[in-house]
Image (cartoon, rainbow, N blue to C red):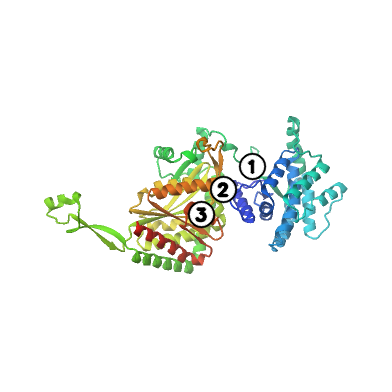
Amino acid sequence: MKIAENGLAVRRRALNMIWTAAEEYGFEPVFMAFTSDGQPDFYMNSIIGYVHKWYDPQIMDELFDTVGQALLKETLDGILWIGLENCAFEREVRERPVLSELRLACADAFFRRQFTKSRQQWMAQNSLVYALQSARWRTVLGKDPGLFNPWERKLFEELNYSGDWDAREIAEHTCQVFRRYFHFRKNGAQNLLFRRLRSTLSKAFTRILPSRIMRAEDLLFGKASDGGGQITARRANHARLISAAEEENNRIYIENCFGLPLLGREESEQTDRLLCTGRHAGCHLYFTAGQRPADAPADPLIRRTIQGAQAQAERNRTHYQEKLHFYQNSISRLSQQIRNALLVYPQPLKVLSRTGLLAPAEIWRAAELDDERIFTDVFREEHPDFSVDLLLDASASRLQVQEIIAAQAYVIARSLALCQIPVQVSSFLSLRGHTVIRRFCGYEEPERQDQIFSYFAAGWNRDGLALKGMDALMADSPSNHRLLIVLTDASPNDDRSIPSDPENRHFAPRDYSGSAGIQDTAAEARSLRRSGIQLMAILNGEDGSPEAARSIYGEDFVRIENVRRMSDAVGLLLQKQIEKLQVG
């Protein structure tokens, strides 16, 4: 099977499809679905999400684990999902009638993909799973199943799982079917010979499928020596120590994909020693302004990544220009709201005066300069004494809204700059153990705000480490007060685990996702606030969980469900933060 070469991004797209259907973000699905060209299968990934939504996950996971120990694991997985598709569809379509149209489209696409097969592929088509899949989609299209073998016809009838069954009924029926047709024994041990045979036999039953559901623990994509796609354990590379050579390879890859580092090698290593500790041990922080190395990379995968980023930047700019009138109005409206907030809550400004509080450090001015201004007085004026940082989540979960995020960030940054508020804009993502923080424009670089349109999404997001990195990046703020606004879906998720922590009764590494990722990000958010940084978040559309956002940001977040309300929502949030500055 050919696997798309941007494997992490493709996997994240599949995850988002599953999470959206399940109405639950952050869990790690046991399976994912891909078409023969390596792209996520929208309908079947939705079915995986509906199975999680409607059926007891513990019972279903036990069933998947049991089947996963079988001799014909891949074959039985494929057959099981033919049955699960039917019952999940019947259960969900009651609430989502449009699912019928999606199912018909999936069936039609299944057969259309067959026209692209070569003669050799057709000759190799010897798959029980394919025959049963074909029968399912033929019936969806209102045709005869087309099965002539009585054994196959009878097995296919057994796969008409009912939408009225619960998880226990599904599990029991599945085990009975597999026992009758494949001599499947629950909890049966496999000897070494069977384990060697499983791979060979499974290939004969499952090769050249137009669409296939695969176990998620086997989804780290790469290139095999023969040029074909290979699939290895997704977290296997992170369960062992990485050699110095591998670390250097990863650093070079990051540098070529995202730009030259802002820090020198020694300073970067020192930053890692200070910040990449505890829950982030073994990870790295990489700061960049996106400047490309002088020499073009030789690696075609890196070149393709750069080309993809450039294409996305063009799409971001096109989107903004197509909606120019709307976004210009948003800038005008938001900047006026910020000005109004500054008028209501003027900032205190200490100045030298002939009266007021004595300033001991200025007494020399009276003796040496005959200057009577050796006192300080406090004036209230409109000039703001705070800076704002925008931090954009650039993980692959944001793939579908990249243009909107870039436009929103530009509108906010431009509005702040028009009010003479120093603003710095960065993005973050995680890849190969590196949390990459890319700075688009600095506090004193309003002319570089157009670089925000270079934003693109890929990889993972280790939100907690990104917040630690921003604490360091914001140290250059020219203002006494610092605000950080994170544009996020509040769903931390990284492929590098959290190390074991026996002192806190965590005796094994944990995935950086779900509650563990949220707890870490919340802890780093509290640390930021203790250092004097005010923190808030913006959630886009229906993405992300308000509960997770509340755990991390408290009440200092806003969800923008309609982009036309962006100016009002952001304006109110900033007004709230400016009021806090005044109180402080």
Q: Which mark is residue 85?
A: none
Separation of disc 1 and disc 2 at Cα?
17 Å
Q: Which residue is mark 2?
A: 514
Residue appearing at x 51%, y 43% in the figure: 297
Separation of disc 2 and disc 3 at Cα?
12 Å
- Locate residue 495, reporting x and y percent: 56, 43
Name which quarter of the figure residue 516 lies in: top right
Quadrant showing the C terminus: bottom left
The residue nearer to you, when weighing 215 against 443, is 215
How dense is the environment of label 2, judged by Cα within 10 Å: few (below 14), some, or many (20 and up)?
Answer: some
How dense is the environment of label 3, judged by Cα within 10 Å: few (below 14), some, or many (20 and up)?
Answer: many
The residue nearer to you, when weighing 355 against 204, is 355
How dense is the environment of label 1, judged by Cα within 10 Å: few (below 14), some, or many (20 and up)?
Answer: some
Amino acid type, residue under disc 3 in the picture: Ala
The answer to which of marks 2 and 3 sits earlier in the sequence is: 2
Amino acid type, residue under disc 1 in the picture: Glu
Q: Which mark is residue 217?
A: 1
| Residue 322 visible in the displayed image | no
Amino acid type, residue under disc 2 in the picture: Gly
Q: Is residue 528 left or right of residue 221?
A: left
Whether the residues at callouts 1 and 3 have beta carbons within 8 Å, the answer is no
The answer to which of marks 1 and 3 sits earlier in the sequence is: 1
Separation of disc 1 and disc 3 at Cα?
28 Å
Dot 1 lies on which element? Answer: helix
Q: Which mark is residue 549?
A: 3
- Locate residue 225, reporting x and y percent: 63, 37
